[in-house]
């Protein structure tokens, strides 16, 4: 796992502030080497004084980062980057503001060479505090970007009052209760809030939502969550389940694969940490639509209780069917 280069997919509606964030990564003195793949180089408006060298479609920055544009096939570009000498610490891929991030994220599950060398680390969505509520009404992509995210940067919070911020936060939580949320002005977040999240690991989700463990599902209860109003989003929801103790991999793996093949179109993201019978290590998986990737990671710690947890985020999910299927995999 650890040898793989982490990939961050950066998404967000037009004008939300992705460029500001990219510029920080490409120019700040953070001492790490990132490769940044952008849709249109011109849009970034990179300060030319900071570009130290350019060959073909790749620009090197004076802080050690490199930048290239997607003109054609993302897989080809990523493969090219992975072959470059002096590998970098991470790859960041920006999607266009109008796009659904799924196909970009899926790239990192599809191609064998890419999958061996890189792994999807997190999907980061930049949202505009002033316009998000409007966008959620009229732009299905904006809602997809929120649902899809592991990290949400709610930017431009200086343009709205505190009540509006809590209202927007509640709307976001109705769509995606599990993403880590940062409220910012000019996308000023520490870079490690965005990069190297290891969103694969649900421990990050547990920081945010201890109720995740109780298998307690927010949507059933109209409760005040940290003093926030609770919204219910009609077509987008999340299902989170946990089983105490072990599950049987012989049952679980076929069930999961069949289920995402069948329902993949409505499942945006799937994640889980599982305790397999007779296996000292935790099995961790994540999925985008019908593509899944998973492996055994660290051992269960002595003080941890072995349990299996699963999250699906998507449209019109069949909660009862998922629950029945998952529960039938208990060892």
Image (tube, rainbow, N blue to C red):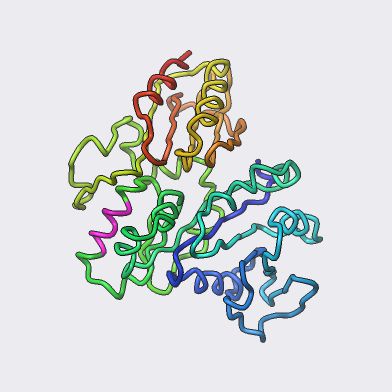
Looking at the rendering, in which quadrant would you find the N terminus? top right
Farthest residue, direction top: 331
Above-or-below relation of 75 to 249: below
Secondary structure predominantly adopted by residues drawn in magenta: helix
The spot of residue 188 in percent (x, y) is 44, 70
In the image, residue 48 lies in the stretch drawn in magenta = no
Q: Is residue 221 left or right of residue 271?
A: left
Q: Is residue 185 left or right of residue 100?
A: left
Position of residue 234 measured from the top left corner of the image (x, y, whole percent): 29, 44
The residue drawn where x is 60% and y is 34% is: 294
Q: Residue furthest front?
A: 138
Q: Measuring 68% from the left and 69% from the top, which residue is drawn there?
A: 67
Apparent side of residue 157 relative to residue 44 in the rendered image (left or right): left
* The image quarter in which residue 153 lies: bottom left
- Image point (33%, 68%), residue name: 131
Question: In this picture, which residue range is highlighted in magenta?
Answer: 165-172
């Amino acid at each position: 796992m650890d040898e793989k280069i982490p990939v961050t997919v950066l998404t967000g509606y037009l004008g939300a502030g992705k460029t500001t964030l990219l510029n920080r990564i490409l120019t700040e003195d953070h001492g790490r080497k990132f490769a940044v793949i952008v849709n249109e180089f011109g849009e970034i408006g990179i300060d030319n004084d900071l570009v130290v060298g350019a060959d073909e479609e790749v620009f090197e920055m004076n802080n050690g980062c490199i930048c290239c544009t997607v003109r054609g096939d993302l897989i080809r570009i990523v493969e090219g980057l992975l072959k470059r000498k002096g590998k970098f610490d991470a790859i960041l891929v920006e999607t266009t503001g109008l796009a659904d991030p799924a196909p970009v994220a899926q790239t990192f599950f599809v191609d064998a060479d890419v999958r061996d060398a890189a792994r999807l680390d997190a999907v980061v969505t930049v949202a505009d505090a002033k316009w998000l509520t409007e966008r959620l009404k009229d732009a299905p992509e904006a809602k997809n970007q929120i649902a899809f995210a592991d990290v949400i940067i709610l930017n431009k919070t200086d343009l709205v009052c505190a009540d509006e911020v809590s209202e927007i936060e509640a709307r976001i939580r109705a769509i995606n209760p599990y993403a880590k949320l940062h409220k910012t002005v000019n996308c000023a977040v520490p870079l490690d809030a965005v990069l190297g999240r290891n969103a694969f690991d649900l421990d990050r989700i547990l920081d945010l939502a201890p109720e995740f463990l109780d298998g307690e599902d927010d949507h059933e209860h109209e409760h005040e969550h940290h003093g926030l109003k609770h919204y219910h989003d009609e077509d987008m929801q999340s299902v989170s389940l946990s089983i105490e103790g072990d599950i049987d991999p012989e049952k679980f793996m076929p069930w999961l694969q069949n289920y995402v093949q069948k329902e993949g179109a409505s499942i945006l993201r799937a994640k889980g940490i599982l305790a397999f019978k007779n296996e000292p290590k935790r099995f961790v998986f994540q999925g985008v639509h019908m593509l899944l990737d998973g492996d055994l990671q660290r051992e269960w710690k002595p003080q941890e209780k072995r349990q299996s947890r699963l999250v699906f985020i998507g449209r019109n999910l069949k909660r009862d069917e998922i629950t029945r299927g998952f529960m039938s995999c208990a060892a």
